[in-house]
Image (cartoon, helix red, strand yellow):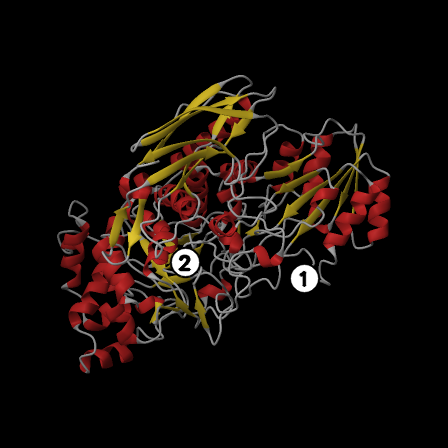
Amino acid sequence: MRPGRGPAGALAVASALALTAVLTAASAPGEARAAAGRCGDPARRPWCDAALAPDRRAALLLRTMTGDEKISMLASDDPFGGPLGGFSENAHADTAGGIERLGVPPVRMADGPAGVRQGRATALPAPIALAATFDPKAARLYGGTVAWEARHRGNDLVFGPTVDVLRTPRNGRTFEGFGEDPYLSATLGVPWIQGAQAQGVMTSVKHMAVYTQETDRLSLGMNVDPRTLREIYLPPFEAAVKDAGAATVMCGFGKLNGRWACQDDAVLNGILRSEWGFTGFVPSDHTAAQDAAGAANGGLDMELPFGMKYNAFLLKLALAQKKVTQHTVDAHVRNILRTMFRFGVFDRQAYPNDLSRADRTASRDAARVIEEGGITLLKNDGVLPLRAPRSIALIGRAARQSPSGFGSAKVVPFATVSARDGITRRAGSGTEVTYHDGDDRGGAAAAARSAELAIVFATDSQGEFFDKSCLTLRCGEPLRGDQDGLISEVAKANPNTVVVLNTGGPVLTPWAGQVKGILEAWYPGQEAGDALARVLYGDVDPGGRLPVTFPVDEHDAPASANPAQYPGLGGSATFSEGVMVGYRHYDARGIAPRFPFGHGLSYTTFAYGGLVATAKSVQVTVTNTGRRAGVAVPQLYIGMPSPGAEVPQPPRQLKGYAKVALAPGRSAKVTFPLSPRSLAYWNEKAGAWKVAAGCYKIMVGESSRRIAGSAALGTCR
């Protein structure tokens, strides 16, 4: 790919690269390893010789450990860290205490899919906003920023990223993942992990293997066929292991096809280790381990938050009863030690907890740049970018807040820039900016009527522990009131009304035809106001594209019409939709969405031409045909032939994307590489990836529903 040099997008890309350089320059691995490690003298402790391979060092150490010391390595010993991690800067999410006698250092861990949840930290935009950037560089910056701050809170490991593929938009943790497409989740998860681990912090990609809802999450039985598992839910984890070298893979809650996730031998030992070659360790989500013998034999290495199952009494009993072998226990300890050696935990001093005193300028700038790249312009009837309006009415409580999700991804920022502050500052003294909280609909309409432009802010509520009861903005009444009604009233009062959505995922927009503009700003992070103002005024092009589909009706969404699919019956959910997840569901059923996957408008226009497709790559030329610099996000979709009625294929699947900044009149040639895997499906009988004979339809466009050009590969009539 040869990106264009247009200032609107090139500046953002350059800024991201510069921020990455700043974070890397401040990183600890090199300088930390130069300092004296905590392991000790290699002459006395041969495993402390950093010149030896991690496997060799782990073997040397393991043979000196007592049985009790081995068992102590298999669980965190900080039962109070998790609940306190969001409030105290000294309370880690988990801590594995180490073994002082042998120079085994503690491993301190932090929640981190959206920033560090340990005291105060930089609140980054929600991961769903990162997904909307369609930008691996932004993902690397995001992971690097999280890990830099985790390190400066004294942590060795961060729990993130979350790469669970979205099955239902009611999922309470929609905001925490990368949306509804496995390819997008995989290709953003990899640079996130690489950026984080470059900071000398281990990552824990989560939650393997299938985690799709909060309702009954602790005990839910999930019935998923092998093809759906392989094509939809496993690819992000596979990429995290094979392409990013993730240090750890966290297993989740519930049962997959009758097997508890944290003792699923077929997945953890069979697929993860034997097939993918994973050499790191597997920690559990908090309380996800079910029994000592089952977890030990099923592939769990470390129990969190403490040893409820992995303790001396239960494991020694399992050993005595020959339910678990000593070889199995040793293998788990070896996995943990090998990973610690691989990431230099033994060979450096403990990271200091000095984030409150550190220069966080790069983190703050990263939060703004990522949000600018993720803000998605859904509709624009010529009202944007703003052209110095004389007066603006800001309506809705989210205008003076920075909405976020709750749970383990909740971050308490040092400071925030509200939309009200950012827009007022950017508008300058020539524009009168007023604010109304929207609680009184009549008063809000009056405020809108007296202004040249009205901007209504609407938000939803989602987070860990609970799924959303509906997809409308009316959910959450009376806490948020009738936001749909508020938007309609304001639109009646002022024809120049723009809606800014601060949501964690798709919502219904019955008022879409009544307003001039709609921006999805997600949960925007601490730099919300400045990022939004820069997009509204056209200082930067809105860089986001939807990583999720917005439905017209509640019942249009996937897994919404059959309770056996969601939320499940009798504590069991059947994934009978198979691979028809997200936009594939809408396409296969011929359902028109309100806003399709991949959709997002620019302040300029683009043309696509010169499409050339081979078995190894697809090329297309993108040209900025407008008068402004802007950012294009060309997307490659492939319609694959079905080898038989028992293997239905969706009309199209995302197989590539790019982000290109172009000045007016400039063009760029974009190349999407293809591999046999790009054209393959999971053959259940063979238990392998296979490429079916037939015609492959190659489609390139601006969204899953806006295809600009197509070609064909294979045997086509």
Name the one closer to the observer, 154 or 175: 175
Give the quarter of the image for residue 71.
Answer: bottom left
The answer for how far apart the CA atoms under marks 2 and 1 are is 31 Å
- 74 w.r.t. 60: above or below: below
Res. 322 mark = none
| Residue 158 coordinates in the image, percent (x, y) | 40, 53
Res. 476 mark = 1
Is the C terminus in the top left, top right, bottom left or bottom right quadrant?
A: top left
- 630 w.r.t. 105: above or below: above
Badge nearest the viewer, 2 or 1: 2
Q: Is residue 8 left or right of residue 223?
A: right
Q: Residues within 10 Å of mark 2 (few under 14, many from 20)?
A: some
Per the image, the residue denoted by label 2 is 578
Name the one closer to the observer, 294 or 612: 612
Q: Is residue 103 visible?
A: no
Q: Residue furthest top?
A: 665
Query: At label 2, which amino acid type do we have?
Result: Gly
Query: At label 1, which amino acid type do we have?
Result: Gly
Residue drawn at 39 percent across, 42 percent down = 187
Q: Secondary structure at mark 1?
A: loop
Q: Secondary structure at mark 2?
A: loop
Residue drawn at 64 percent across, 28 percent down = 538
